[in-house]
Image: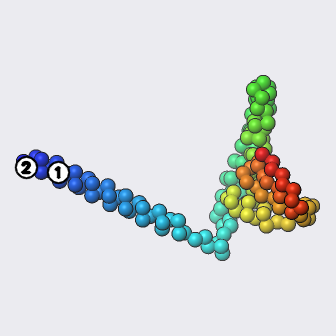
Amino acid sequence: MTAQANIKCTAKYKLLTVMVSASLAFASMQSALAAIEIDETDFGPSYETMAVDTVVGKPLQLIAAVAGTAAYIVSLPFSLIGGNAEQAQQKLVVEPWNAMSRCLGCTIAEDNYYKSQVVDNNVDNNVVRIVVDQPSEIIINTNDHVVVRP
């Protein structure tokens, strides 16, 4: 075997060794990331997230909601022609204004959790409401009546 062939063979083995090592490292990291536990005592918004949401987040959400409403009004003739006025209303009006009602400093998951803990006395006690993905929800009446709203 010549010296040049020997160098090529050594480079291939080094490359193969690096690739296998990297694959094993990534594979071992996946199980470590999956085992992360949530500390429920530290769940919810912090002072910092509430302050930033008050100063930056909510004003930007308000601007987005007003701009979305204006864009919806301007685009209404075109969306009526295209037959997607309801989709435009959902994306440009409903979702931005709903974002304004999110609790201060909360992520979407935290807000959903807190809202699920609130007891609503105006709702029938035999109804279980599961919000799957806005605006979809599944309503199950314990009297064997199931309603799915897309």
Q: Is residue 7 left or right of residue 36?
A: left
On-image quarter of the C terminus: top right
Residue under the image location 82 percent in, 66 percent down: 118
Q: Position of residue 39 (x, y in %)?
A: 62, 73
Q: In this view, does 11 lie to the left or right of 92?
A: left
Which structural element holds mark 1? Answer: helix
Q: Which sits in the foreground, 128 or 77?
A: 128
The type of residue carrying mark 1 is Cys
The type of residue carrying mark 2 is Met
Q: Position of residue 115 (x, y in %)?
A: 78, 62
Say which residue label 1 marks. 9
The answer to whether residue 70 of the structure is visible from this angle is: no
Q: Position of residue 144 (x, y in %)?
A: 86, 59
Say if mark 2 contacts mark 1, CB within 8 Å. Answer: yes
Whether residue 55 is situated above or below residue 94 in the rendered picture: below
Whether residue 15 is situated above or below residue 68 in the rendered picture: below
Which structural element holds mark 2? Answer: loop
Residue under the image location 42 percent in, 65 percent down: 28
Say which residue label 2 marks. 1
Q: Distance between the residues labelled 2 and 1?
A: 10 Å
Give the mark nearest the N terminus, 2 or 1: 2
Q: Where is residue 73 in the image (x, y as percent from the top left)?
A: 80, 32
Q: Which sits in the foreground, 115 or 17?
A: 17
Q: Which sits in the foreground, 118 or 16?
A: 16
Residue under the image location 10 percent in, 46 percent down: 4
The single residue placed furthest to the front in the displayed view is 144
